[in-house]
Image: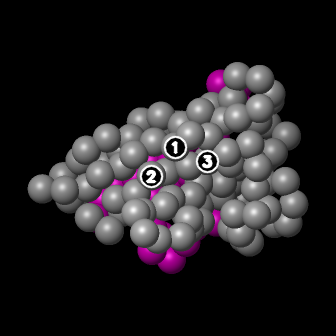
């Protein structure tokens, strides 16, 4: 079973986007969900993570104060609201299920059910 990301696109610096992560074959409410990104030639890096009931969140230093993770378990969807986007935010963004460890680990090997990703490009 995989997750499905959507909401990416081309945006100017300083702009905003909201990414969505949905599942059609299983219920997300039992799992912590993480967002990752990978730029060309770079390793996949953790961006943010949210606990199963949404009471705890984690953000990478690079996105603190600009990105907000949230979830609507009734809609079986996790969101990543991104504001004040910068060119260095350009990457393919992925969501995944935390299968081992804590929400602060953000080690890709601790996550599973990866989606195909959604491209975010920040450019003037």
* Residue topped by disc 2: 92
Q: Is 80 included in the stretch rendered in magenta?
A: yes
Residue located farthest toward the left when viewing the structure as drawn: 124
Any part of residue 84 in sight: no
Q: Which of labels 3 and 1 is toward the front?
A: 1
User: Going 70% across and 35% down the picture, which residue do you hit?
Assistant: 2
Left-right relation of 89 to 103: left
Residue 4 placement (x, y as % from top left): 59, 33
Decide: marks 2, 1 in contact (CB < 8 A)?
yes
Which of the numbered marks, if any, corresponds to residue 117?
1
User: Going 29% across and 52% down the picture, which residue do you hit?
Assistant: 121
Left-right relation of 38 to 34: left
The segment highlighted magenta reads 58-86
Q: Secondary structure at mark 3?
A: strand
For the N terminus, give its image quadrant.
top right
Q: Which of labels 2 and 3 is toward the front?
A: 2
Relative depth, front residue between 48 and 42: 42
Q: Is 71 included in the stretch rendered in magenta?
A: yes
Residue 29 placement (x, y as % from top left): 79, 37
> How many angstroms separate mark 2 from mark 1 (CA)?
6 Å
């Amino acid at each position: 079973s995989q997750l499905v990301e959507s909401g990416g696109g081309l945006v100017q610096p300083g702009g905003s986007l909201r990414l969505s992560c949905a599942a059609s074959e299983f219920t997300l409410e039992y799992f912590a969900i993480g967002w990752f990104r990978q730029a060309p030639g770079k390793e996949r890096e953790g961006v943010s993570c949210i606990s199963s009931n949404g009471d705890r969140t984690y953000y990478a230093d690079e996105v603190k104060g600009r990105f907000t993770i949230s979830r609507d378990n009734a809609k079986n969807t996790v969101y990543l609201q991104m504001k004040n986007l910068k060119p260095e935010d350009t990457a393919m963004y992925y969501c995944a299920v935390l299968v081992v460890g804590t929400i602060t680990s953000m080690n890709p090997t601790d996550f599973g059910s990866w989606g195909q990703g959604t491209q975010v490009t920040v450019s003037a």
